[in-house]
Amino acid sequence: MEKLTIKLNNEEGLHARPAAIFVQVASKYTSELTIEAHGVEVNGKSIIGIMSLGAFHGEEITLTANGQDEKEMIEELKNLIENEFKGY
């Protein structure tokens, strides 16, 4: 299991376009993924689940991946968030 807590620095947080990009990237991997914010945990491959978190700019989220390619998944999602969803 790989776990990462990271701050959302992009202007929109995890809403609409960023949520769609996040799901697209996460879905490339076979590992299971959950995202936690505000004490609520959702499936990290579900756009509706992610948007229901209401994770805004400046807030922290925790990603937890479990499976064969968990390390690669967390690393790419970390890069995605740190680069403010640019280049995807």
Image (cartoon, helix red, strand yellow):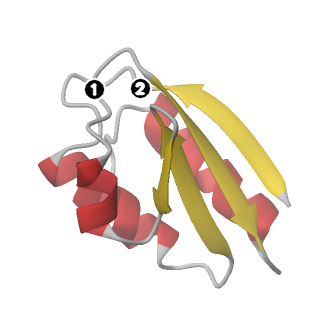
Residue depicted at 65% across the width and 85% down the height: 30
- In the displayed structure, 9 sits above or below 78; it is above
Q: Which mark is residue 8?
A: 2
Residue depicted at 60% across the width and 79% down the height: 29
Q: Nearer the viewer, mark 1 or mark 2?
A: 1
Residue depicted at 46% across the width and 59% down the height: 42
Q: Nearer the viewer, residue 58 or 48?
A: 48
The outermost residue toward the top is: 58
Q: Quadrant of the N terminus?
A: bottom right
Crowding at mark 2 (Cα within 10 Å: few <14, some 14-19, many 20+): some
Q: Nearer the viewer, residue 27 or 38?
A: 38
**7 left or right of 55 in image:** right
Residue depicted at 38% across the width and 20% down the height: 9
Q: Which residue is mark 1?
A: 56
Q: Nearer the viewer, residue 73 or 86?
A: 73
Q: Quadrant of the C terminus?
A: bottom left
* Residue 84 placement (x, y as % from top left): 36, 32
* Residue 4 placement (x, y as % from top left): 71, 39
Q: Secondary structure at mark 1?
A: loop
- In the displayed structure, 62 sits above or below 30; it is above
- In the displayed structure, 88 sits above or below 80; it is below
* Residue 16 placement (x, y as % from top left): 13, 51
**43 left or right of 66 in image:** left
**60 left or right of 84 in image:** right
- Callout 1–callout 2 Cβ contact below 8 Å: yes
* Residue 56 placement (x, y as % from top left): 27, 26
Residue type indicated by callout 2: Leu
